[in-house]
């Protein structure tokens, strides 16, 4: 099944169950001081959950552009190193606003995964909220019992608030959740260790694909929980991970969501993508493919790279990609802007804003690349001299004043100095920053 078919099947399934299909909200948020970017499909519905806006449709489904690079949900440093985290990703979601609740949500999730997508049901594990003393909440035994209709009890696992009580941020709507995990390891691997022991253990082939949240509370600034006026369902499925499972791959980057970009990067850089976990050139290609999507969608939504706030987040993502290209693929000239047509070809139908803004996206990226490559070249040379000094004098620490000078005088980002130092096991004296 191609990624386009997978997306469409999700939307068709929920349309059949009475959901109105809506377009993705922008990824860049301009009117919520608690969030810079959409980090979950439910963000655009926050006021509906809280009872602050009228409910027009009680059932909605969509695919939402999300970015998790700041605040409570931040995956940036994982991206490219592992095979299943992303900055920008699509979240497939279905919502009930004061309409159906746990029973239907669980049943329709199961039917989609097993009957429509044909995931082997023995590969599925689910989790439920095990209760929390501090919040005085009991275990969600209702959810556990609903799952028992579909699967044996040994694959239904309780977890604590950290994993099974979803909150949008420090404040806002929240509630217990049930997560669906899939074990895509080989039969041999499964014999050695049960998938049950690998759920929520950062195993790249035993991963969460779908979270179903049962919105019941609002977390107030003083930490207390207040019951919402009605009960809602908020689900989010990681589209790229789902594609990995359905296309029989072991990495999101091996699916047709990322391969066209990765192959284009391989062609431009003259290096093959081997798909290894450790090879720096493979990591670099994953970083670039991922980050190009994040930056392009942000620009399409009107967020240009800049020196503060959301603009700086975008600039940092772009610079992380340029730095990986420079260091590990020998890309010393701007190249990311040349990848924009490949992205538009793959995603421009579902997200027409990309196609519409294609020229501006490419030119903004090209300008940023040019400026940062100049800074990088000079900064990396200076950093290497500092690193030599630190090694020679035996301190194994780059003095803070020198790191600051790199930043202040030469525009070399502090986080990059720290990153480079970490890579060669040097410290940076951050005193005074
Ligand atoms: N809000 C939940 C999440 O982001 C489900 O959509 O995981």
Image: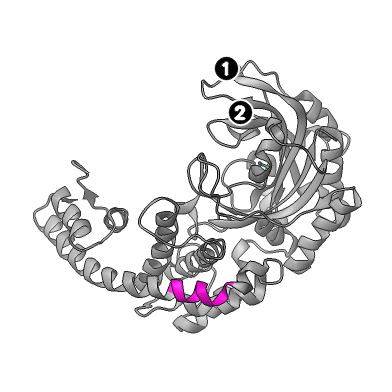
Give the number of marks. 2
- Name the residue that disc number 1 marks: 134
Regarding residue 384, the answer to whether it shows in the image is yes
Over which residues does the magenta segment extend?
357-365
Task: Indicate whether residue 361 is drawn in magenta.
Answer: yes
Left/right of residue 273 with respect to residue 402 in the rendered view: right
Task: Indicate whether residue 213 is drawn in magenta.
Answer: no
| First of labels 1, 2 by sequence position | 1
x, y percent for residue 128: 71, 32
Contact? badges 1 and 2 (CB < 8 Å): yes
> Which secondary structure, mark 1?
loop
Rendered residue at 72%/63% (across/down): 248
Q: Chief secondary structure of the magenta span?
A: helix
Q: Image quadrant for the N terminus?
A: bottom right
> Which of the labelled discs sits on residue 161, or is there none?
2
Q: Closest to the observer: 297 or 292?
A: 297
Mark 2, Cα crowd under 10 Å, few <14 / some 14-19 / many 20+, is: many
Left/right of residue 129 with respect to residue 415 in the rendered view: right
Position of residue 433 relative to residue 219, above or below, is below
Left/right of residue 41 with respect to residue 265 in the rendered view: right
x, y percent for residue 344: 62, 74
x, y percent for residue 399: 15, 50
The answer for how far apart the CA atoms under marks 1 and 2 are is 10 Å
Rendered residue at 71%/61% (across/down): 243
Rendered residue at 22%/70% (across/down): 378
x, y percent for residue 229: 74, 25
Give the image quadrant in which the ligand numbered 1 is located: top right
> Which secondary structure, mark 2?
helix
Rendered residue at 82%/44% (across/down): 57
Left/right of residue 381 with respect to residue 62 in the rendered view: left
Farthest left residue? Answer: 393
Position of residue 399 relative to residue 137, above or below, is below
């Amino acid at each position: 099944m191609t990624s386009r078919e997978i997306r469409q099947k999700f939307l068709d399934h929920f349309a059949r169950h009475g959901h109105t299909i809506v377009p993705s909200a922008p990824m860049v948020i301009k009117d919520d001081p608690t969030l810079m970017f959409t980090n979950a499909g439910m963000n655009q519905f926050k006021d509906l959950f809280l009872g602050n806006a009228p409910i027009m449709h009680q059932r909605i489904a969509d695919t939402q552009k999300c970015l998790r690079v700041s605040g409570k949900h931040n995956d940036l440093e994982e991206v490219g190193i592992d095979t299943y985290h992303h900055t920008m990703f699509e979240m497939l979601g279905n919502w009930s606003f004061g309409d159906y609740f746990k029973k239907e949500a669980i049943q329709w999730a199961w039917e989609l995964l097993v009957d429509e997508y044909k995931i082997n049901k023995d590969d599925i594990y689910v989790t439920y909220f095990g209760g929390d003393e501090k919040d005085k909440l009991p275990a969600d035994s209702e959810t556990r019992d609903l799952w028992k209709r579909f699967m044996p009890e040994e694959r239904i696992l309780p977890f604590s608030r950290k994993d099974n009580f979803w909150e949008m941020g420090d404040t806002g709507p929240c509630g217990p959740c049930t997560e669906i995990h899939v074990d895509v390891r080989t039969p041999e691997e499964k014999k050695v260790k049960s998938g049950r022991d690998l759920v929520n253990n950062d195993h790249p082939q035993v991963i969460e694909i779908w979270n179903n949240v049962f919105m019941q509370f609002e977390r107030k600034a003083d930490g207390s929980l207040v019951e919402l006026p009605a009960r809602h369902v908020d689900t989010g499925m990681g589209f790229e991970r789902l594609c990995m499972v359905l296309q029989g791959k072991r990495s999101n980057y091996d699916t047709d969501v990322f391969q066209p970009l990765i192959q284009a990067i391989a062609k431009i850089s003259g290096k093959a993508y081997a798909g290894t976990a450790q090879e720096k050139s493979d990591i670099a290609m994953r970083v670039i493919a991922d980050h190009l999507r994040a930056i392009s969608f942000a620009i399409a939504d009107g967020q240009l790279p800049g020196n503060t706030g959301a603009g700086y987040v975008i600039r940092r993502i772009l610079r992380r990609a340029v730095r990986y290209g420079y260091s590990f693929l020998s890309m010393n000239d701007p190249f990311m802007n040349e990848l924009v047509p490949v992205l538009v070809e793959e995603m421009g139908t579902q997200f027409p804003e990309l196609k519409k803004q294609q020229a501006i996206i490419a030119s903004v990226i090209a300008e940023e690349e040019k400026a940062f490559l100049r800074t990088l070249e000079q900064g990396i040379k200076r950093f290497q001299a500092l690193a030599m000094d630190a090694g020679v004098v035996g301190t194994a620490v780059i003095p803070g004043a020198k790191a600051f000078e790199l930043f202040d005088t030469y525009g070399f980002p502090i986080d990059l100095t720290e990153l480079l130092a970490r890579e060669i096991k040097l410290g940076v004296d951050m005193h005074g920053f």
